[in-house]
Image: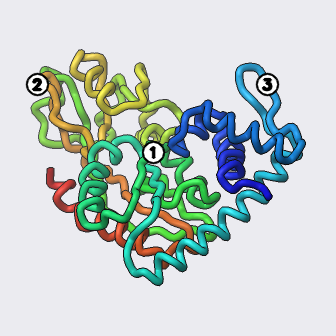
Amino acid sequence: MLDLARLRALHAVSVYGTVGAAAAALGYTPSAVSQQIAKLERETRTTLLERQGRGVRLTDEARQLASTAQQLLSLVEEAEVRLEERRGLPSGRLAIGCFPSAARGLMPQALAELARRHPGLDARLSEVDPHLSIDLVARGVIDLAVAHDWDIAPMPAPPGVEQAVIGDDLCDILVPLGHPLAERDAVRREELKDERWISQPPGTVCHDWLMRTLRAAGCEPHIVHQAEENHTQVALVAAGLGVALVPRLGRGRLPDEVATVRLDPVPKRRLSALWRAGAARRPAITETVRTLQELWPSVARA
């Protein structure tokens, strides 16, 4: 009989593409994942992974087995949902994927509150790009995603995935102290055409929003520095190297060398929780979403 934990390891590799990424998602070491798959190869008498450069690729047999594993994991999830529903209390493991600034600014409070209220719930957090998290929910890799989108760059949930709004996160223009805009209360988008921008890399939600918004105002953004982390962008602004559009969530206290200017109209990104429709009855899901919504007003004010 095939071992479910080993199938889960293979399925994670098929989703994340590498043993290391699969291990991080499962909360294991890469060595443990490799051992699970090696045992599965012996059980099935089949080669499942082949070396490809510095990484690995799944064989055709492995892809077929990973597809079957996803079906089995869905059945297991349904059984767990029914049991938890009967107990009426949030319990068991809950895998949560969240983008970095919410992982820093929202999730610590939420996870602490869940642990206090529901000691039987084992909630585990992983930082995940919002573009990827929704697909990971749909494929059953994580149970719940906290993602964001923008007014002009929405990310609709795919079939089979439900969502609930957590709240709106406001964004500000950050400029170096002494910049001509630093003393302004507000600035319009058309006035930013000559600025040197610090942005996230192409393909991220924030970068796409910046490009679309300024182009719609007749400006071609001149991006001179790219940084994934908001804190890095803030440090670059503090050094006088450009301006940046940075959300408030998880931003923390700004250095004295940085001033905030309101952009008119104020950009907003909407935070949402997403989960598979089949798990909608699970108390762990409903209670986690409720906790996030309860906490959001105080987090947004802070």
Q: Mark 1 points at which residue?
A: 126
Badge 1 crowding class, 10 Å Cα cut-off, few under 14, some 14 to 19, many 20 or more, is some
Q: Does 161 sit above or below residue 49?
A: below
Q: Is mark 2 on a helix, strand or loop?
A: loop
Q: Is residue 152 visible?
A: no
**Whole-Å distance between the Cαs marked 3 and 2?**
49 Å
**Whole-Å distance between the Cαs marked 2 and 1?**
32 Å
Q: What element carries label 1?
A: strand
Q: Mark 3 points at which residue?
A: 52
Q: Which of 141 and 258 is in front in this view?
A: 141
Badge 2 crowding class, 10 Å Cα cut-off, few under 14, some 14 to 19, many 20 or more, is few
Q: Do the residues labelled 1 and 3 touch (CB within 8 Å)?
A: no
Of badges 3 and 2, the one in the foreground is: 3
Q: Is mark 3 on a helix, strand or loop?
A: strand
Q: What residue type is labelled 1?
A: Ser
Q: Does 102 sit above or below residue 90?
A: above
Q: What residue type is labelled 3?
A: Gln
Residue drawn where x is 77% and y is 55% of the image? 2
Q: Name the residue under label 2.
A: 256
Horizontal placement of 286 versus 181: left or right?
A: right
Q: Which amino acid does label 2 sit on?
A: Asp
**Whole-Å distance between the Cαs marked 1 and 3?**
27 Å
Residue drawn where x is 76% and y is 52% of the image? 66
Percent x, y of residue 48:
82, 39
Percent x, y of residue 71:
73, 64
Q: Can residue 291 be seen in this view?
A: yes
Quadrant of the rendering where the N terminus is positioned: bottom right
- Res 176 → quadrant: top left
Percent x, y of residue 273:
42, 62
Who comes first in sequence, dot 2 or dot 1? Answer: 1
Residue drawn where x is 24% and y is 17% of the image? 240
